[in-house]
Each structure stands twice: as C-alpha cells, then as structure tokens.
Image: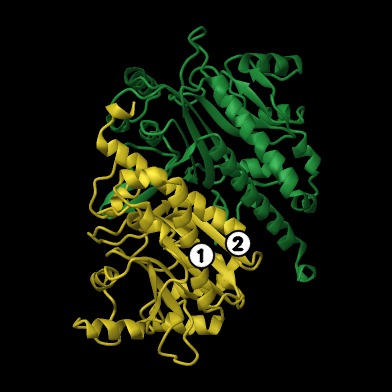
Chain colours: A yellow, B green
C-alpha cells in the first residue's frame, strides 16, 4: 500500500504521526510531574474591544474565540497546584509569515509557587522528555523527513539561558544594529538561533515587551520575570513563560498602563475576585514545536488543516 | 488546607479530577488499540446555511465553529487506519435542558473496515477500560461525590444491545404510548435507562432518524447501521455511532433527501474528492459521560466553565 502512495502523503503521515507522539509524550511528562489536565472555555465573553480575537455571534450576544487559558488559569490554580491544557487557540492577526496560524494548538501550563527558574526547568525537562521519546519511538518518521533523530537525542538539560541584556551584547558584538530596549524581531531571533544546536532561553525582557501579566524583577524593576524558549537552527520562538502578577492592585495598574479596554479590565478583575496564588506559567505553540522538530519550511505543514490569514481553507 | 475549603470546592475538584482521569484513560485505550490522535479544524468554512453552527467573523469571511470531525475524518482515514480526536465542539441549539452544552468536548473515533458490531465493541471496550481505571485510581474522588466505585467496577462487556425494534416492543409492553417509526425522546430514553445498571446500546434506528451519513442495513433498508450508547440510571444517550456512507453518489442522494443546503453538498463532496475507505465511527459527549460517572444533576457541573443557551458565562 505504501508504494502506491505519493511522497507527499508519506511525508504528511510522518508529520502527523510525530505530532501525535509529541502530544503523547507531553501528557506523559505532565502526568508524571503531577500537573492536572484541565480545559478552559473556547467561547469567551466579548467584554472589551480585542482586535486580536475572532468575534463569534453567540445567539444574541457577541463573544470571542479564546486566545489562551488566562484568566481561567487563575481559577484552576485555586483548586489544583499545577495544571496544564492542550487546546485550540485563536488569534486574528493579519500576518503573512511562515510561522503564524490563526488557529493553533497550545500546550499551556501553570504551577503554584514556581519561580521563573523553576518554570524554565519545567519547560526544558518537558522538551527534553519529548525529544527523548521521539528519538526512541519516531525514528523512522524523522528519517522519512530527512531529520536525524540524533539532533533530538542530543537535546539535554540544562539549556542555555541568556538574559535579554546578554543577548543585546552578543548581537551588538556580532555587528547587529540593535540597542538595549528594542524588541528582538523574529528575524533577529531566528538569525541568533542559527548559532545554536539546542533550544535556549532568552530571559528577563524589559517592561512593556510582554503582556502586562508578568512580574517585574524586584532588583531591576525595568526587567520582567519572563523567558522565551527559542528553537535552534533558525526556527525562533516556540514558547513564552514567566512569573505571573497575582496581586489585583498591581494587575489593575498594569492594565491601565497597557491601555487595556476599561470594560475588559473590570471583567478581568471581577473574574479573579481576590489575589491569586503566586505562580508561573508557560505556553508552547504546538505547531512551532513541530515545525522545528520536523524541520518544516512552513508552519502550515505542522497541522492537518491549517488556518492562516492568507489561505483558502477547506 | 482542605479543611478550610467549601464542600462545593471539594466537589468541583473531585469532578475535574475524574474528568482528567477519564481523558487519560481514554487516550491510553486508544493508544493501546492503535488509534492515532489527530486534530481537525475548529474554524470551518461557512459554505451553506447551518442553523446549528455558531458563525464567526473570520477576517472578511464568514466561518463556523466545528460541530464534529466530519468530513475531515474521511481525509485522516486516507493516511491512518484508525483515528481519534478529543476536542471542543459546538452547537448553537436553543435548548434549556440539563444535558446540553453549546461548547462540549467530544471524544471522536473512526476505524477503517469496522462494522457496526466492531465499532460497538470498540465503544464498550473503551468504556469498560475507563470505568476500570477510575475504580482503581479515582475511588476517593468518586466517594466524595457519594458515588460508589462499585457501580463503575461492575460495568463489564458485553453490554446489552437492543435493536430499535426490540426497544419499541419493550416500551409498548410497559404501556408507553409509542409507535414504530417514532423518535425515542430523551425523556423516553432516560426512563428506559432507569431499568439498567450498566450502559447499553440501542441499534439500527429507522432511516431519517440519524444524520444522512450512515449506511442502511442491506437486508432491511428502512433501518440504518447505527447505535446509540445509553447510560443507565436515567442519564440517557452518551454516544452515537454507525457505519459511514463512503460512496459519493449515495452520499449526494442522502444529502438531497435530507435537504442539506446545496452549497454545503457541493463543498462536502468536493472535499471528499473520491469514495472513501469503508469505516465506522463513534462520538462520545465527554460531559455526558462525566455526568453519568459522577451522577451529576446538571451537565454544567461536568465542565469548569460551562456554556449553555441560558447561562451568563464568565
């Protein structure tokens, strides 16, 4: 039967098989590490104006498609110490790139009392576990994609952790025209990642880079307790993480600064009710992870029925 | 810490814990039985008028929220023999019941060359596996809900399989005012299910009861090769299944008969491209399963953030 198939079908099967095995490995790791699986809602109330959310007509109301587990994660952490979810997530961004889907699957986790370092530990342990499992049980699929299982097998902890400050220094030394305080564009991140053989973290981005949800470094308040996980070989960001703000007053101040729609602020704070347990969280874009694992040119190869800004979806 | 918690929080935790363990057990069973995990799209094209689908504004287009894996399952079965997915699914029905959510999680599976009997075998083996696992690893949560683990432990194969014809006969003997050819309303199904201690199947519903997707019984063409799985103790339907029509011409004729919007017919048949592999499929409503397992009065207790026609969702 295999002989009658087109190479394209064989390649698709290998990618989807690796995708399934990646999800299986991720869940095994979460279970072994006492993360409870939860599901947040996909339909969320449209209380404020959120240009990056797809609007739904929910009977006579307007609603949005979820862009992630927050603030529902706060509620789950009141009853479980550590949680994870793997679910479709949406963003209505008009981007024509090879690494943005409008509907993507997100591996999201949150852990009570975890510091930034601990949530990075969790991510690198999870990632290493996935890579090890795929080396063992997806070697033939990887070979079909001309991907050496050795590349994944060589991923070992600890992963390199560069601070944003160090990253800027490195880039400047390499002649990159970038100043402290500027965003690392995907182009810069990808270029930097070409110099790495394993995934690595960039940590402590300046304030206002990330969402308003993240804590500041108490010793250097201009920096946030955040970390992006960057895939090597030119693939760029695959996960973001950080210590979350759990104090309602600080959250409110941050939302005002970030110019979040007032109605949204009100809803968000009412939802949280009281200060939450201290915790850190991370979110991995499944298709970005698969894109790197399988070394795919375009992220739309990492999902069976891709939705992007440009495609004519079936 | 537990002592300071309200009984409601404790109950919620037990339910969500059982939900997570049910999903874990289901995936283990699928993996052990060579079903490959896949993900269909959540955003689907709005080609025809589908009153039961929620419309989304997808940039400048109209789209719908998915109501299930079809016809995407046909495409997956071209590359995998057996598939499953566990994903949020949507229906825009204006129903005020204790067993309908507008957003629910669906455990859906399809298997090449499986007959109706084989797909029932699969469902009962999966269900028994879940019940056994929960008996072993969720006994304390079940007890917290005043649910005896023994109830689940006693679920054993084979489950009773009543044909629709037999069911009508039984109901008539019991003095129920129902004629052959009439639908089994949820009320009738629930009442019947009070007479059972274990889940059971009702099979071979008359034509036009189910969707146009199901094959007819070649020996009795007025009956379809379908089966509903009914939870006992008054809970009613938790899964539906059947042998799928895979011949494009027959599918087209059925769609015309079912008065499916013509544009939708055209899209559907174009998507399928050619006749598909013979297969059977089933879909379990996760929250309905949890509602029975946990003996919950209302289905909105089976999910953390329920969306129903009537609720004011947070």
Screen quadrant of the N terminus of chain A: top left
Image position, residue B308 (x, y; %): 55, 49
From the viewer's side, name the closer residue of A88 and B32. Answer: B32
Left or right: residue B182 compared with residue B265 = right
From the viewer's side, name the closer residue of A183 and B93. Answer: A183
Screen quadrant of the C terminus of chain A: top left
Measure how far apart labels 2 and 1 are at the Cα level: 10 Å
Q: Which residue in the structure is indicated by mark 2?
A: A33
Residue B295 vertical position relative to residue A242 in the rendered view, above or below:
above
The total of numbered circles placed on residues is: 2
**Outermost residue toward the top in this view:** B219
Q: Residue A125 has which mark?
A: 1
Q: Earlier in the sequence, mark 2 or mark 1?
A: 2
Residue B181 in sight in this render: yes
Residue A33 vertical position relative to residue B46 in the rendered view, above or below:
below
Residue A244 in sight in this render: no
Left or right: residue A173 compared with residue B143 = left
Residue found 28% across the figure and 30% down from its top: A5
Image position, residue B133 (x, y; %): 69, 43
Whether marks 2 and 1 lie on the same chain: yes
Disc 1 residue crowd, few under 14, some 14–19, many 20+, Cα 10 Å:
some
Q: Chain of mark 1?
A: A
Image position, residue B89 (x, y; %): 48, 44
Looking at the rendered structure, the secondary structure element under dot 1 is helix
Looking at the rendered structure, the secondary structure element under dot 2 is loop
């Amino acid at each position: 039967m295999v002989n009658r198939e087109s190479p394209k079908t064989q390649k698709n099967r290998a990618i989807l098989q690796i995708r399934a095995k990646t999800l299986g490995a991720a869940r095994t790791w979460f279970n072994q590490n006492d993360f409870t699986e939860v599901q947040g809602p996909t339909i969320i109330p449209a209380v404020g104006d959120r240009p990056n959310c797809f609007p739904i007509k929910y009977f006579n109301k307007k609603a949005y498609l979820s862009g992630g587990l927050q603030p529902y994660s706060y509620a789950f952490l009141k009853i479980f110490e550590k949680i994870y979810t793997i679910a479709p997530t949406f963003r209505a961004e008009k981007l024509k790139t090879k690494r943005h889907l409008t509907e993507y699957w997100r591996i999201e986790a949150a852990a009570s009392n975890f510091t930034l370092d601990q949530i990075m530990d969790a991510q690198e342990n999870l990632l290493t576990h996935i890579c090890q499992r795929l080396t063992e049980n997806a070697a033939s699929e990887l070979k079909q994609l001309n991907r050496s299982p050795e590349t994944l097998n060589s991923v070992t902890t600890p992963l390199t952790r560069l601070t944003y400050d160090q990253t800027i220094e490195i880039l400047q030394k390499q002649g990159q025209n970038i100043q402290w305080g500027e965003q690392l564009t995907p182009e810069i991140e990808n270029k930097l990642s070409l110099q790495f053989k394993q995934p690595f973290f960039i940590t402590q981005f300046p304030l206002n880079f990330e969402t308003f949800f993240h804590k500041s470094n108490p010793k250097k308040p201009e920096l946030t307790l955040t970390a992006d996980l960057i895939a090597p070989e030119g693939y760029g960001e695959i996960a973001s993480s950080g210590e979350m703000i759990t104090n309602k007053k600080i959250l409110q101040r941050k939302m005002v600064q970030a110019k979040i729609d007032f109605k949204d602020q009100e809803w968000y704070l009412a939802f949280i009710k009281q200060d939450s347990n201290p915790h850190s969280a991370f979110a991995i874009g499944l298709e970005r992870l698969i894109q790197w694992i399988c070394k795919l040119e375009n992220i739309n190869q990492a999902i069976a029925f891709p939705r992007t800004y440009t495609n004519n979806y079936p």
